[in-house]
Amino acid sequence: MVSEPDPELLEQLRALLGDTGLRIQPDDVIPDVVLRPQTTEQVSGILRLCCAWGQAVVPMGGKTGLANGHIQTDGEFGLSLERMNTIEEIDSSNRTMTVQAGCILQVAVEAAAEQGLLLPLDFGARGSATLGGIAATNAGGNRVIRYGMAREVILGLEVVLADGTVITSLNKMLKNNTGYDIKQWFIGAEGTLGVITRVVLRLRPNPISENTALLAVDSFDALTGLLHSLDARTSGQLSGFEVMWPEFYEYITREGSLHKTPLPHGSAYYVLVETLGSEPESDAEHFEAVLGQAMEDGLIADAVLARSQSERNALWEIRDDVLEFFKLGPIIPFDVSVTLDKMEGFIEDIRAGMNTLPDAICIVFGHLGDSNLHLILGSKDAEAFDHQALNTLLYETVQHHQGSVSAEHGIGVSKREQLFRSRSAAELQLMMAMKKMLDPKNILNPNKIFSAETLAAG
Amino acid sequence: MVSEPDPELLEQLRALLGDTGLRIQPDDVIPDVVLRPQTTEQVSGILRLCCAWGQAVVPMGGKTGLANGHIQTDGEFGLSLERMNTIEEIDSSNRTMTVQAGCILQVAVEAAAEQGLLLPLDFGARGSATLGGIAATNAGGNRVIRYGMAREVILGLEVVLADGTVITSLNKMLKNNTGYDIKQWFIGAEGTLGVITRVVLRLRPNPISENTALLAVDSFDALTGLLHSLDARTSGQLSGFEVMWPEFYEYITREGSLHKTPLPHGSAYYVLVETLGSEPESDAEHFEAVLGQAMEDGLIADAVLARSQSERNALWEIRDDVLEFFKLGPIIPFDVSVTLDKMEGFIEDIRAGMNTLPDAICIVFGHLGDSNLHLILGSKDAEAFDHQALNTLLYETVQHHQGSVSAEHGIGVSKREQLFRSRSAAELQLMMAMKKMLDPKNILNPNKIFSAETLAAG
């Protein structure tokens, strides 16, 4: 039963936010209400009111999440941080940046770069993802192997609790052991425990040298040996170790595609490696020497080094051209983690399962240094495509290999029913106790991570 | 009012743990009871019983904490993890290590090194501190600038809640966004929210080159410039930036001391810098070149490079010889954080305050890259030593400069009354709500971080 928004509540919200602070879009069933605060005080006022009225609220950043954690359903109010997008400070002495939650990643990255500093978060949605959303989902991406997930980049947060209480915890210090580290509770909680309004980020020196190569590797053992060897010998500089299984590489560089074929087809694995450093000349020499040694050691079968920015871009474009797979037929992209010792067996099991299906599509790639695999499963025959069967095959196999059903995308709505495969009943009970403590009326992003029914029963 | 331990409870604990699992030491007033479980199940059984009886329990690791978070007072039972000290696994494929909580840091570091891997936690108490205690206090130390605090090194935890529930969350994957990251709640909570029984640690490649130098620097601006420049130009390799104010360096290397004087007295600051890398020859050349450039840029006034392991040790021994200051008179060592932009003003204010006292001792040093300062305040005249006055001067000045009253030592009992200076009333309320949710009877390390009275009133 969904009812129209209460006119009195809407009136009070309009008084708080002004006309431009309230966007009401007519809809077939119930009008969509989106609240657009400009200050933390307004967010607090919104939540005080919504808490009193028992009104559900869905916090929204750039709405680029891949687990539907930002989806607003009938009767829920959107709470968009889009008007809170200011970079409040770049502190080059402490190398921190303080932004409002609605600030877009790319804007922040460019502002930091102007000061010669690096905000080391990077992934495809950089042009629309907001730092509030990134904090709320503990986003990962391309350089986690070197700089960590969003959690490692966030020094401080401001968050508004379900009852409107503002928790301002804008720490800038790397060492600060004063009681419980509250910000950790909200990072990765997908807006279910509080609404993030400000973020303090740790900045790094901007690297000025970049070395990139595409490598062919013959076996999984050689692949892990290569990862460990490069990590050791490029001490602290390894920033990318992106593995493409042959179906990925061979399709993207097939005859007639837009890409050149930098290495011939037929190898077991293709790896894009990247280091970031500070000395263009000696870093390039060292990179080449390290790869040469790995080749002598039998870890690499073939290699091509990028000699210019355009060659670097060309290699990354192969890795990034994931949308191309939608041409194959109906597919589902998955994001999971499996430990390295179990990864080969995991993929064998998935392949065995897919082989029983007609015209199966099975594409594998991933950020191997972080245990993170992306799989694209589907069918060239649209008639034979069975979303449910693919979901079951994938997630049951993840569970069997003690993997994680979500590496970096979070749970949202999409993976809610899979969560039990990666977390124990005791863990889930504890999470739900936290949710109930911080949001007893379940008004904050309800039905994300846990369904209202599960919460009520738990 | 403290009463004798209940004989029936003791009997039940003896039945659970056996005779060797229970150590009862006679005491002037009340016998000290220390419980010594051998398994997680026994820890769970202990807490189930103690919860039912409302019996307070103090978890104990190596008891090396500097904020008295491990102190057992009359009527409380100690819960020592000393018999749970096994290294359960070193997984060289995933580069993780799983240990029981009572495992001693140095033992774990040496076991990792035997596999060519680095457990990058390091500080003075390495020979007695346990990994459970390190996790519970989010310990820091010497290499935080490169590898982060304990929080960044811990991938998974097993923890027993106050009611005996076992939460096994032994994650090994760098990317794992499956619901709330429960382990973060317990890291740094000083045993007040649960008892940590197992820890999964992230291991790194073992660095094989090490470069160390002692530098003299003329101004605070040059000091921060040097930190930023070295961090940028030794991309990813800077592992130490330890600053000694002149009173520190000049006293430790005074005539008649055990140390040589590698650089003449009279500079404004002395900095011990260290990089860890993988290529002994080229790393040394690069280190020298980077320091040469910094000297040309006017950031360094004088420098001495360690040419051998014994020279490296000699430089570190100057930095580490902190106990020497106890010879000056009664002193208090402090551990605080202040952001770099406020650090100079903070120290000026402390000095101004100390100058009003007769025969004041005021020694400053710190891990500057982490905002972490250690101060040693006291008086050469034991009669004039006023513990309370020094405490007040130090912590009021930290508060005035928006610093942290505890950088890496935690709160325990020692800093409990100072916590409000670094955390807001709203933050403290939220922390106490968490404590009450997870430990409603306040049996886990009571009176640490928050007094029982504060909790009851909050």
Image: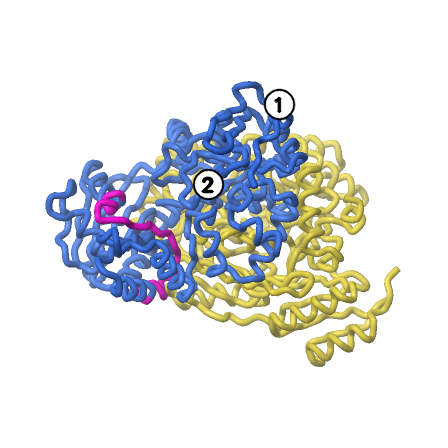
Chain colours: A yellow, B blue
Residue type, numbered disc 2: Leu
Residue type, numbered disc 1: Glu
Name the quadrant containing residue A167.
bottom right
Q: Residue at x 71, y 51 (%)?
A: A436
On the image, numbered disc 1 is attached to which residue? B11
Q: Residue at x 49, y 55 (%)?
A: A153
Element under disc 2? strand
Q: Within the magenta stretch, is there residue B343?
A: yes
Of all chains, the one bearing label 1 is B
Identify the residue at the far right of this view. Answer: A1
On the image, numbered disc 2 is attached to which residue? A215
Give residue A270's position: percent from left, percent from top: 51, 40
Residue B96 in view in this figure? no
Name the quadrant containing residue A195.
bottom right
Q: Within the magenta stretch, is there residue B237?
A: no
Q: Which residues are magenta?
A: B323-345
Residue B323 in view in this figure? yes
